[in-house]
Image: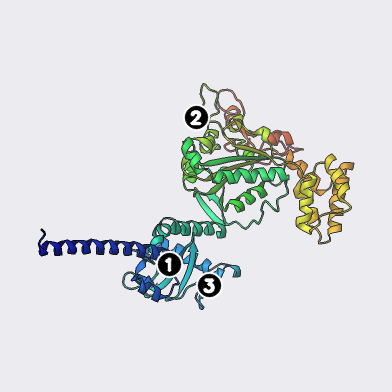
Amino acid sequence: MASPANGALERYKSAITAATSVVGAAMLLRRLVADVLPAGAPPLVGALLLLPPPSSRRHAVVIEEFDGAFYNRVFLAARAYVSTLLAAAPTGAPPVVKASLPRGAGAEQITLAMRPGTTVVDVFRGAELTWRLSGGGGGRRRADGSAGEAFRLSFDARHKDVALGAYLPFVMARVEAMAREQRQAKLYSNEWGKWRPVRLRNASTFATLAMDAELRQDVVDDLDMFLGRKEYYERTGRAWKRGYLLHGPPGTGKSSLVAAISNHLHFDVYDLDLGAVRSNTELRKLLIRMKNRSILLVEDVDCALAAAPRREADGGSDGSIPASKHHKVTLSGLLNMVDGLWSSSGHERILIFTTNHMDRLDPALLRPGRMDRHIHMGYCGFGAFRELAATYHGVGDHPLFPEIEALLREVDAAPAELAERLLATDDAGAALESAARLLRDRKAGVEEDGGWYVKQKLHAGPRRPRLRPVPVPAPGRGRGARAARRVVFDEEILLGVSRRQGRGSGRRGRGAGVRAPGRGRR
């Protein structure tokens, strides 16, 4: 028979067990209600359910303006991103904001900023995140003595993973993309072994470029694919670069295509003048000093390499031309820049060579794998002409179009020539008639200003004549010694005019390539 004390103990244990079960069920219910209860629910509902206040269920990230002695990059990105939220005018935007205009920017680049103590709300993947700007406390101060600012990003505790793992990386990537789009590209030129920048103000784009529509789309797709293949280049062990060889007659838009590529990718352009490079070592230094996400341009590469030897050697069994003081950059140095070890010194780079005479290039520069794409910029077709007419005069159709289309099938005309005629007047009809007259005259064999320019440039040789020492017997005294030091220019003898004299010639032999008429030998 159980004693009264044992019965009371059993009842106490049962009560404790029941109370524990009730408390556990209440905590589970409370957790479920807290997850589904909207943020705007009345506080009384949470109080009846014994829920903590909303402020205790929110987490926050503080982003200060300074990180030690330097500006905090996350703060700068947050300020730029919040400016876009204010411009979009969401419902949670503050009623008063600050407006500023960066130095050198246009009126369309006015930026908005929050005032200290104000908030703005953003929604990302269903999570509500609140940005609040406050004045900084202690720590580093600005140059004017004012305290730095700080952003406080607050969010619900259940969205912690979204806010830290996805939202902040999204903000950084978004600001970086905006900076690339708004950035003004620069044009660099080499001078005394250094790059000198200026603003690239060429407004050429693929939309305004006079070229075949299929070729244009092919180039754009190739560029976009190049930008998105970082993992591919890393996986295959190749340098993240792309090479293009633009060839074709003058005036066909090769330089305009380079500007269009720069504006499409927002890349800087490094215009390399090989004639100003003093050695292969200087060429490598210039290559190392280039920034990533840039274009290296070598225009008229056939002229730049006309006098360059293949190697820096004093002659050899392989028949290579000995290097001299006139030969600054060798072909082997240029090829190492294209696909040698030094070509891997940067990433996201595009190499562009242009030439009017592809047949003059060394075969080593054209072999497969050295230049990824060969793009032929040919004479103007009717499709390109229609784009020129639409761009310059807004003309989509005209009675002269059938005649111009038939003429373009029979005669060659560079887009630059036709564009010059279209730009000569604001009258669309007169401009089209001028372009048609140019094609008619060319078909009839009547050459005008534009025709002789293209013909002469097509047949132009290298920019600088090559030097050829004249074979002479063993050096001796008198005239033989002076002849041994004489240098003859090939082109001057062919033209019959002595425009330059070789260095080091004798006193009486100076300038004796062509004797003036009426003067005999003394």
Look at the image and tell me whether residue 513 can be seen.
no
Q: Residue at x 66, y 48 (%)?
A: 257
Image location of residue 116, percent across then percent down? 43, 75
The label nearer to you, 1 versus 2, is 1
The first of marks 3 and 2 along the sequence is 3
Q: Is residue 277 above or below residue 106?
A: above
Q: Residue at x 52, y 67 (%)?
A: 85
Residue 91 bears which disc, if any?
Answer: 3
The label nearer to you, 1 versus 3, is 1
Determine which residue is flagged by label 1: 37
The type of residue carrying mark 3 is Thr
What quarter of the picture does the C terminus occupy? top right
Q: Secondary structure at mark 1?
A: loop
The first of marks 1 and 2 along the sequence is 1
Image location of residue 496, percent across then percent down? 74, 36
The label nearer to you, 3 versus 2, is 3
Q: Secondary structure at mark 2?
A: loop
Look at the image and tell me whether residue 494 can be seen.
yes
* Res. 21 image quadrant: bottom left
What quarter of the picture does the N terminus occupy? bottom left
Residue sitting nearer the eye, 36 or 300? 36
Q: Within 10 angstroms of label 1, few (less than 14), some, or many (20 or more) residues?
A: few
Image location of residue 14, percent across then percent down? 21, 61
The type of residue carrying mark 2 is Ala
The first of marks 1 and 3 along the sequence is 1
